[in-house]
Image (spheres, helix red, strand yellow):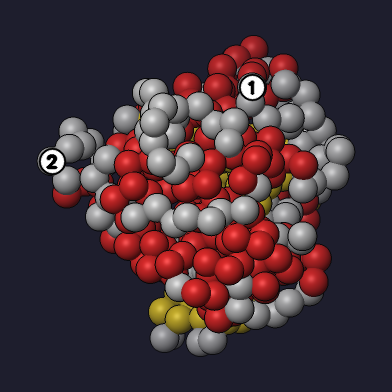
């Protein structure tokens, strides 16, 4: 890992520094894998006798930078360069071909940056997430949520999406985005909502017509979690000939559908509809599965906040905040890969705590 991240680019010269950027990144990554959420905590861990021995034996790190140096070195790492290395690192852990898998795109605002004077606007990060494996593939930092739209098209060029189903929320239901997905060799499933009002109204009118809906293929699932019951019913139609002008705008449009979600909790029932378009001919079961994969990226966002304290992070430097976001995702990727390969039922928090108690367990997590 140390040698791999030594190739990261920096935003300014650092000749003469006592400690290298590669070693600093290695320490921060390993400390984050232990569930530590601040540079001060990571430094304290690295200075412990057990951690010092581990870092020396496995990474040749003989001297531990102070917390000030760790922050300084982290701040000069170029986030784009680190993200490039992160993307390549993650791709090496996956099969050669990802055909048939789902890549979800969604953004998350780093809320802690919204209260800092150094930021005109809170940092917002768009992630590409391989839902079937639970791994983040790459990411892009944008100024605000609306800038996710061009950022997604740029991300599509950074990762190999050939043969995959690309899923995204209504913000990314854009004709240019659909065309970009197809040109990169993938299919799309896009959530249709208010920003495509005419398309949404037409699909809604079709689905809500009881006679037309009765001829659509359908499938229902039911789940009970605690006291909450969720019923999902999917409807799919492959006849898009009636869609007229939409066909000329949406490249490859071959299917549309809807999912009705009913939630029952405390004797109250809520009912909501979601409408979709796709370039792939789907069964109702496939629509349910791909839509579920789109929502699964929220679990990664939850882990960033709850397990790794991202929304309470007090780092003020913009570069450092972006780099820490990448490092957290790298740590989560390794934990998820370990769970996938080992079948471990332990939650992420317990796995991170195990790394903190026993440095050698880090080697198991990272498959060394």
Along the line of sight, the residue nearer the viewer: 149 or 63? 63
Tell me the element at label 1.
Answer: loop
Is 273 placed above or below 137 here? Answer: below
Residue in view at x 63 percent, y 26 percent: 158
Say whether residue 49 is left or right of residue 70.
right
Residue in view at x 18 percent, y 33 percent: 120
Tell me where residue 4 appears, x and y as whole percent.
Answer: 65, 39
Residue 180's mark? none
Along the line of sight, the residue nearer the viewer: 336 or 262? 336
The answer to which quarter of the image holds residue 163 is top right
User: Are dots 2 and 1 in contact, CB under 8 Å?
Assistant: no
- The crowd level at tag 2 (other Cα within 10 Å; few <14, some 14-19, many 20+) is few
Tell me if residue 170 can be seen. no
Along the line of sight, the residue nearer the viewer: 81 or 116? 81
Say whether residue 226 is left or right of residue 58.
left
Quadrant location of the C terminus in the rendered image: bottom right
Tell me if residue 361 can be seen. yes
Tell me where residue 159 appears, x and y as whole percent.
Answer: 68, 30
Mark 2 vs mark 1, foreground winner is: 2
Read off the residue under disc 1: 157
Distance between mark 2 and mark 1 Cα atoms: 34 Å
Residue 117's mark? 2
Number of marks in the rendered image: 2
Tell me where residue 29 appears, x and y as whole percent.
Answer: 53, 54
- The crowd level at tag 1 (other Cα within 10 Å; few <14, some 14-19, many 20+) is few
The answer to which quarter of the image holds residue 132 is bottom right
Tell me the element at label 2.
Answer: loop
The answer to which quarter of the image holds residue 48 is bottom left
């Amino acid at each position: 890992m140390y040698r791999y991240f030594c190739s990261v680019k920096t935003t300014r010269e650092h000749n003469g520094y006592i400690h290298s950027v590669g070693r600093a990144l290695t320490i921060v990554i390993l400390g984050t894998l232990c569930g530590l959420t601040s540079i001060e905590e990571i430094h304290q861990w690295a200075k412990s006798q057990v951690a010092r021995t581990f870092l020396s034996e496995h990474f040749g790190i003989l001297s531990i930078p102070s917390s000030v140096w760790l922050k300084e070195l982290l701040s000069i790492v170029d986030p784009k360069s680190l993200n490039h290395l992160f993307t390549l690192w993650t791709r090496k852990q996956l099969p050669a071909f990802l055909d048939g898998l789902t890549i979800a795109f969604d953004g998350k605002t780093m809320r802690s940056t919204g209260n800092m004077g150094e930021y005109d606007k809170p940092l917002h990060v768009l992630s590409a997430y391989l839902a079937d494996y639970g791994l983040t593939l790459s990411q892009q930092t944008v100024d605000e949520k609306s800038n996710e739209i061009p950022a997604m098209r740029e991300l599509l060029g950074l990762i190999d999406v050939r043969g995959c189903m690309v899923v995204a929320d209504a913000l990314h239901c854009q004709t240019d985005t659909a065309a970009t997905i197809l040109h990169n060799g993938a299919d799309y499933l896009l959530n249709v909502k208010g920003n495509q009002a005419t398309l949404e109204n037409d699909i809604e009118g079709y689905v809500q017509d009881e006679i037309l809906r009765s001829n659509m293929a359908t499938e229902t699932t039911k789940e009970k979690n605690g006291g909450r019951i969720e019923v999902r019913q999917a409807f799919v139609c492959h006849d898009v000939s009636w869609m007229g002008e939409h066909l000329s705008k949406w490249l490859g449009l071959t299917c549309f559908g809807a999912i009705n979600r009913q939630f029952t909790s405390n004797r109250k029932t809520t009912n909501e509809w979601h409408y979709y378009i796709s370039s792939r001919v789907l069964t109702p079961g496939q629509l349910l599965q791909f839509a579920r994969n789109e929502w699964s990226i929220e679990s990664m966002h939850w882990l960033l906040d709850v397990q790794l304290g991202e929304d309470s992070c007090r780092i003020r430097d913009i570069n450092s905040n972006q780099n820490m976001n990448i490092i957290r995702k790298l740590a989560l990727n390794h934990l998820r890969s370990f769970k996938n390969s080992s079948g471990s039922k332990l939650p992420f928090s317990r796995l991170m705590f195990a790394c903190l108690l026993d440095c050698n367990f880090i080697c198991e997590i990272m498959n060394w």
